Amino acid sequence: MEMKKKYRFLGDVRGKGLVMGLEFVDPKDGYTPSPEITRKVIMQSAENGLLLGKVGLYGNVIRIAPPLVINQEEAEMAADIIDLVMGSLAL
């Protein structure tokens, strides 16, 4: 939820427990789905060692669903990678 406040292109963060969805939108209007931004986040996250997948009708949602054996350190590392990648996008 903290990242949603930082990035205008992160339109929604939803989910329960470990299963989350990050919805990416056009930063100009904050509404239009942006599969382009989603693709950039996925590709750059992979380059940093974090594999993510997209879902959704428009292909603009990243699904976070880690294995149940994930520990706090690994979860924080994944969140740090996502934050680093989103911060590096020049939008």
Image (tube, rainbow, N blue to C red):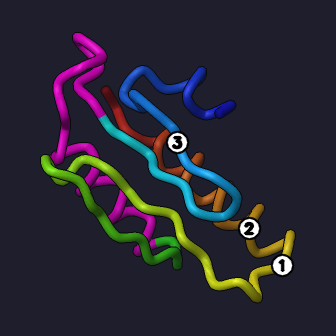
Residue 60 x, y percent position in the rendering: 24, 47
User: Residue at the spot x=70%, y=58% of the render?
Assistant: 17
Q: Which residue is mark 2?
A: 75
Q: Earlier in the sequence, mark 1 or mark 3?
A: 3
- Front-lying residue, 24 or 68: 68
Q: Which residue is mark 3?
A: 14
Q: Is residue 82 magenta?
A: no
In three-dimensional space, the C-alpha distance between marks 1 and 3, rounded to whole angstroms, equals 21 Å
User: Crowding at label 3, few (<14), some or many (≥20) Cα neighbours within 10 Å?
Assistant: few
Relative to 63, 77 lies left or right: right
Relative to 50, 53 lies left or right: left
Magenta region: which residues? 25-47
Which amino acid type is marked by label 2? Ala
- Front-lying residue, 57 or 73: 57
Residue 71's label in the rendered image is 1
Q: Quadrant of the N terminus?
A: top right
